[in-house]
Amino acid sequence: HRRCLVPMSGFYEWRPGDPAGPLTSRGIPVKQPFLIERADHQLLAVAGLWSAWRPPGCPESTPWRHTCTVITTDANATVRPVHDRMPVLLARQEWSAWLDPGNSDARSLMSLLRPAPESLLQIRPVSPEVNSVRNRGPFW
């Protein structure tokens, strides 16, 4: 089944820059990053899929690589002004259904992959410095 939960405190999305606003050194409008997090500051539980694999052609002694991906859905009204997609955020009471390896009911699983309620999240602009790993936070 390979379904998992990916915990996160929040996630960033970037709104395209205003052509009349500040420009990068290459003349491109500076994008505005936004931090999206739970309004109550609890962790988000994001629906994901995981895999363990070895690169093709590598010997059996090659360590397994463990990877995951987050599942996205249409943005809710809170996120939509910044981006058209958002991670699928699962409520605590949905975790066991998502993680249950015996649950192969596609219809019930697909019903979990929907936008989060608007009231769950808050969104706020943060410094463009979040865009570089050279910078150390906080950025808000």
Image (cartoon, rainbow, N blue to C red):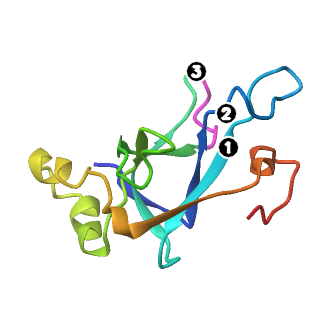
Q: CA distance from mark 3 to mark 1?
A: 43 Å
Packing grade of label 1 (10 A; few <14, some 14-19, many >=20) is: some
Q: CA distance from mark 2 to mark 3?
A: 44 Å
At label 3, which amino acid type do we have?
Gly
The mark that comes first in sequence, 3 or 1, is 1
User: For mark 1, what is the residue?
Assistant: 32
User: For mark 2, what is the residue?
Assistant: 17
Above or below, comparing residue 93 to residue 1 in the picture: below
Task: Estimate the x, y position of residue 23 in percent, counting from the top left.
Answer: 81, 29
9 or 81, which lies in front?
81
Identify the secondary structure beneath mark 3: loop
The magenta segment: 57-63
Residue 70, disc: none
38 or 96, which lies in front?
38
The mark that comes first in sequence, 2 or 1, is 2
At label 2, which amino acid type do we have?
Gly
Task: Estimate the x, y position of residue 109 in percent, counting from the top left.
Answer: 18, 52
Identify the secondary structure beneath mark 1: strand
The mark that comes first in sequence, 2 or 3, is 2
Q: Check whether the beta carbons of the residues at disc 2 and disc 1 lie within 8 A of each other.
A: yes
Q: Residue at x 82, y 20 (%)?
A: 27
